[in-house]
Image (spheres, rainbow, N blue to C red):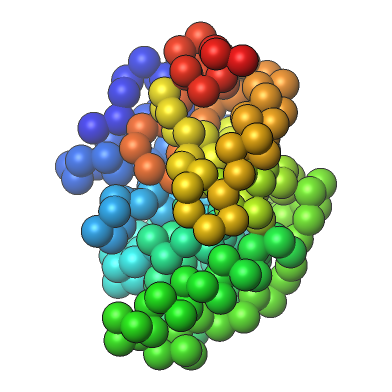
Amino acid sequence: MESAKNAALLPEMDLSQKTGELSIDGDVMNIKKIVVGQLDVNCYIVSDDSKSDALIIDPGDESERIIDVIDSAGLEPKYILFTHAHYDHVCAVKELRDRYKAVVVMHEQEKETYGMTAQLCMSWGYDAEDFPEADLIVKDGDIISIGSVPLKVIHTPGHTPGSICIYGENTLFTGDTLFKGSAGRTDLPGGDFGLLSASLKRLMLLPPETAVMCGHDDVTSIADEMRNNPFIKRR
Ligand SMILES: [Fe+2]
């Protein structure tokens, strides 16, 4: 279950009955969190207040459950974005892209990781076509607009070379770069602890009240991580 201590940051929190899942109706931006796959990845559905245009962040697995949430809310996904391309964050991309004809978004330095993911998953029985090429390659500073909501791409290498965070409306989606009280591992191919440390330092320049939606586990805030995260405190 999500921590309630962020309620001041996240108005109208409406916790669903499934552990870890979350629905937030903000003034401008709405967020739905679905926990998917064997590694419990947080897939986020972000929409503007018109509740039409939507962004899917990290379509990790269980496309049927993601589709059910999207269709039940009457949303029309325009983009499917990978915070990074490890398999637990991308495996439902084909089903969602086929259904919604949404644009698949990835950072320019994540192509190698995505290729390795496809190879790994094919060894498990997936087909090459299950991993369609990205339609839109982004870089630091690019803007993805969801209706009236602009969301900024922040390149945060370290966990993987092309890891990105997405920032807007006082909310930061961090993938596996920053977790509540922790940070992404750097021992996988393309990982770099020095780069990760620099990325975390950059994220700490965001306003302290920024809500942080991580790729796994609970919601936190920049202020809480500045105080409590050992990857940040020890520098
Ligand atoms: Fe990862």
Q: Which residue is found at the position 51% from the left and 44% from the top?
A: 186
94 and 128: which is toward the camera: 128
Quarter of the image with the C terminus is top right
Give whichever of 104, 150 is nearer the camera. 104
Image quadrant of residue 112?
Answer: bottom right
The quadrant of the image that shows the N terminus is top left
Answer left or right for 146 relative to 54.
Answer: right
Which quadrant of the view contains residue 172? top right
| Residue 57 locus on image (x, y percent) | 52, 56
Would you say 23 lies left or right of 136 here?
left
Measuring from the top left, give residue 37's x and y in whole percent.
Answer: 28, 60
Task: Give the residue displayed 24% in from the left and 59% down from the top.
Answer: 38
Q: Residue furthest top?
A: 227
**The one of 99 and 201 positioned closer to us in this rendering:** 201
* Res 62 visible: yes
Q: Is residue 45 above or below residue 183?
A: below
The residue that appears at 59% across and 56% down in the rendered structure is 190
Please say whether residue 223 is visible from this viewpoint: no
**Total numbered badges shown on the rendered structure:** 0
| Residue 137 in the image: above or below residue 156 | below
x, y percent for residue 31: 47, 44
